[in-house]
Image: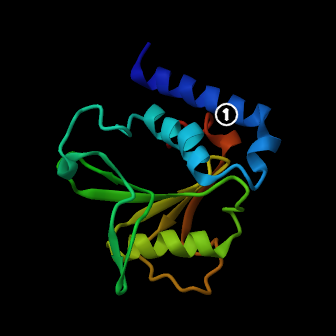
Amino acid sequence: MTHKEEGYNEIAILVERFTEQYDSYKKSDYNETQTRRDFIDPFFKALGWDMDNHNGYAEAYREVIHEAKVKVGKATKAPDYSFRLVGGKRLFFVEAKKPSIAVKVDILPAYQVRRYGWSSKLPISIITDFEEFAIYNCTKKPLATDKAYVARIKYLTFNDYLNEFEFL
């Protein structure tokens, strides 16, 4: 079996588990950390990212930095994940949320991830709670009043992951 087939199968298992226990994951007490551990980390691992630094790279060369530091205005913020090329060049941020957050319509998470991307001059950034997955164009300056759909390039739900596997 190829890495690609293994990844597809891993995501199929995650989608099936999320579907079976959907109601419990949507409760507000199912938090972001649980979501990251149960779904988001395994999801990106299935897509081939070294989420746990199994390669043993020094901090400067890791593919994924958890809680990376970013200057946003005068403040230093910490996006949940910074995905990078080997060698340290940042590609995009991923901001994790718990499934009780409405990623598709909630203005604050969209503004948050777009500010991270804009401040770091990244072309895209992503918000996900596993249930939903939204990719944003970060080349357009975000405004706090922007609706969640502003600058959104693509929106998927967990039911789309297998059909959109090639895209992912």
Q: Which residue is mark 1?
A: 15
> Residue 87: where, in percent of width, then height?
17, 49
Q: Quadrant of residue 92?
A: bottom left
At 39% from the left edge and 58% from the top edge, which residue is drawn?
67
Q: Is residue 96 above or below residue 71?
A: above
Question: From the viewer's perspective, is residue 106 above or below residue 144?
Answer: above
Residue 8 image position (x, y, % from top left): 53, 27
Q: Is residue 17 left or right of residue 11?
A: right
* Quadrant including the N terminus: top left
**Residue at image location 36% in from the left, 37% down from the top:** 52
Task: From the viewer's side, name the closer residue of 7 and 20.
Answer: 20
The image's colour scheme reads rainbow
User: Which secondary structure lies at badge 1?
Assistant: helix
**At label 1, which amino acid type do we have?**
Val
Which quadrant of the view contains residue 125?
Answer: bottom left
- Residue at the (29%, 45%) spot, across then down: 63
